Amino acid sequence: MPQLARRTDAAYLDFVEGFRAYILGNGANFEQRLNDALVAEGEARGAALVDPGEISELVRAWPLGRLRDRLARTQQEMKWHAIRRSFDEQRAGLRAELERWDTSGPGRLLLDPDFVYPPYLNVHFHLQPGGYYKDELSGFLYHYGTKVFFRGDNDRDELHEKLVGLVPGPADGRVGRVLDLACSIGQSSTAFKRRYPEAEVCGIDYSAPMLRVAHRRAAMLGDDVTFAQRLIERTGFPDAHFDLTFAFIVFHELPLRIIHETVREAARVTRKGGMFAVYDFAGSREMSPFQRYHRWFDARHNGEPYSQDFCDCDFARILRDNGFEVAAAPVGKRSGGAGYMANWFATRV
Ligand SMILES: C[S@@+](CC[C@H](N)C(=O)[O-])C[C@H]1O[C@@H](n2cnc3c(N)ncnc32)[C@H](O)[C@@H]1O
């Protein structure tokens, strides 16, 4: 991860990381306090609150709810403002750094000069300035942004290595090719390469700036991974090409139509007996009233316009309908800064 321009920038972002932990964790305890109030309100009305519109009206009528929302939005703006300003000051140097690594190995960077970005991708996810692809430094911004976001779980790829380590391999143990869908800066891809050193590992993403950072990172670490600019719903790989296909926190950023297309594509490229492992937000049905509110808020005020649809869909059913067997119902759990997470480990049948 590149250094920030000044030590005061790093100190400021350390503060933002702590501020974020305080607001979203047990310090200010907003979640517990607001959830208790929502549960009490449900009891008073004789039925648990489930409708996000109804819940949001209540939360926004309470001063505590409005305070929490303002702080949640503000820490996100503080974070991106500071990161962008600090990398802007080093723009020329970072551009040269990317150019230097583009053609160095190990590993390969395959960008498509004719790539057309589909309109549904034109979103500033989590308020990242320039979104995922409009700034040539998007990959660097994202890396530092997720360092702050994951609150200590992303300083040295800790979260990615843990999650990749928990993926059950195919039952026959055969792992010759791994596909990391929407790999961003390739942290899961390199974790897979370390777990299966003999396998060909390929990370795909639509964002060229992300892939350039992914390639630079992997090459600096000495990991032989291929990074290619492709859509996850139309990968272009042959049928049954991969033993293990993986997707970490991308499905909640896709419109419902693309969710369906991506699962269909994963089923096409994963061989019979192969594994499709997905980590993402837990479904609405497993959420507390406050967690439902948090989704509603994120969709409107934190650059997550499609996440509600993902949480409301029956993802296990979509997997089954496309030829996967899902071993067990996903279990929602807290994970770093990522909120309420779940996993789906699906075998291609
Ligand atoms: C939240 S990040 C995913 C994190 C990543 N999987 C990891 O392991 O850190 C979302 C990524 O998905 C990519 N993406 C979103 N929709 C995509 C699509 N339809 N095709 C390819 N990449 C996509 C974005 O460019 C971005 O890099």
Image (cartoon, helix red, strand yellow):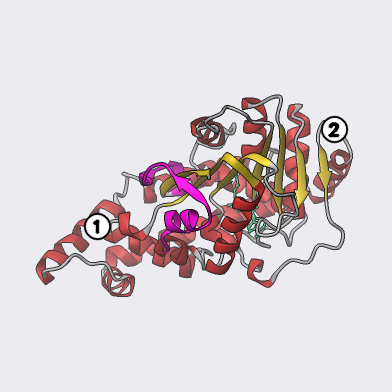
Label 1: how many Cα within 10 Å (few below 14, some 14–19, many 20+): some
For label 1, the residue is 35
Q: Which residue is located at x 86 percent, y 42 percent?
A: 102
User: Does residue 58 appear left or right of residue 114 in this picture?
Assistant: left
Callout 2 amino acid: Gly
Spatial distance from mark 2 to mark 1, Cα to Cα? 51 Å
Q: Which mark is residue 4?
A: none
- Is 160 rendered above or below residue 257? above
Q: Is residue 324 magenta?
A: yes
Q: Is residue 69 magenta?
A: no
Q: Which residues are drawn in magenta?
A: 313-338
Element type at mark 2: loop
Q: In which quarter of the view is residue 118 placed?
A: bottom right
Q: Position of residue 149 (x, y in %)?
A: 51, 47
Seen from the viewer's position, the closer of residues 277 and 32 is 277
Element type at mark 1: helix
- Is 82 rendered above or below residue 115? above
Q: Which residue is located at x 42 percent, y 47 percent?
A: 341
Q: Which mark is residue 105?
A: 2
Q: Position of residue 90 (x, y in %)?
A: 78, 47
User: Does residue 229 appear left or right of residue 161 in this picture?
Assistant: right
Queried on whether the Cβ of the residue with tag 1 lies below 8 angstroms from ligand 1, the answer reads no
Q: Position of residue 163 (x, y in %)?
A: 51, 36
Seen from the viewer's position, the closer of residues 196 and 4 is 196
The N terminus sits in image quarter: top right
Label 2: how many Cα within 10 Å (few below 14, some 14–19, many 20+): some
Q: Is residue 89 visible?
A: no
Q: Nearer the viewer, mark 2 or mark 1?
A: 2
Q: Position of residue 260 (x, y in %)?
A: 55, 63
Q: Is residue 235 visible?
A: yes
